[in-house]
Image (cartoon, grey):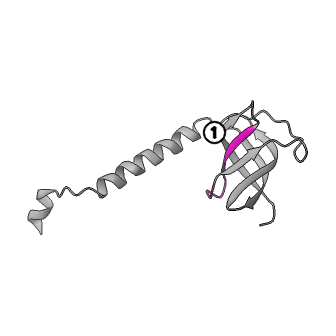
Amino acid sequence: MADRQMFGVVLWSDDTDKKAVIWCEDHGNLAYYTHNEASDGTGLSLDAGDLIQFDVSEVRHMRLARNLRLIGQEQFPTLAQRLTGAVTASAALQGASNSNVIDARMRLRA
């Protein structure tokens, strides 16, 4: 897959290791960023919620981000929490629908 530009929001970052996990504008797989002096001279300090533009490529079914450009700091500071909440709610609904408990009222109507 050739590199293409994409917008995304930083969900998690580690300044010490210079790594980040990015939610992509196309709502596809997450992109992973690791700072590499040889190929990436950005030196950005990233925080969760930062809106960025980057080049993305896919290597062995993993999206890799490079050439990050900061568009806006803390534009979506609660996105990671909101996504986690959505997954938790979805899992709760999934668990409820997989239950083997049958509502007696539904059975009587049948």
Residue 75, position as x, y percentages in the image: 67, 38
Q: Looking at the picture, does residue 22 appear above or below residue 49? A: below
Question: Which of the pair 61/96 is nearer the observer?
Answer: 61
Among the 4 quarters of the image, the one containing residue 51: top right
Label 1 belongs to which residue? 76
Q: Position of residue 25 (x, y in %)?
A: 67, 54
Residue drawn 70% across the image and 41% down it: 20
Q: Nearer the viewer, residue 109 or 66?
A: 66
Q: Quadrant of residue 62?
A: bottom right
Left or right of 103 in this view: 20:
right
What residue is at 74 percent from the left and 46 percent from the top? 33
Q: Amino acid at mark 1?
A: Phe
In this rendering, would 31 be left or right of 98?
right
49 drawn magenta: no
The image quarter containing residue 52 is top right
Left or right relative to 105: residue 15? right
Q: Which residues are magenta?
A: 19-29
Mark 1, secondary structure of its residue:
loop
Q: In the image, is residue 27 part of the stretch drawn in magenta? A: yes
* x and y, in percent, of residue 36 in the image: 84, 43
Q: Nearer the viewer, residue 39 or 68?
A: 39
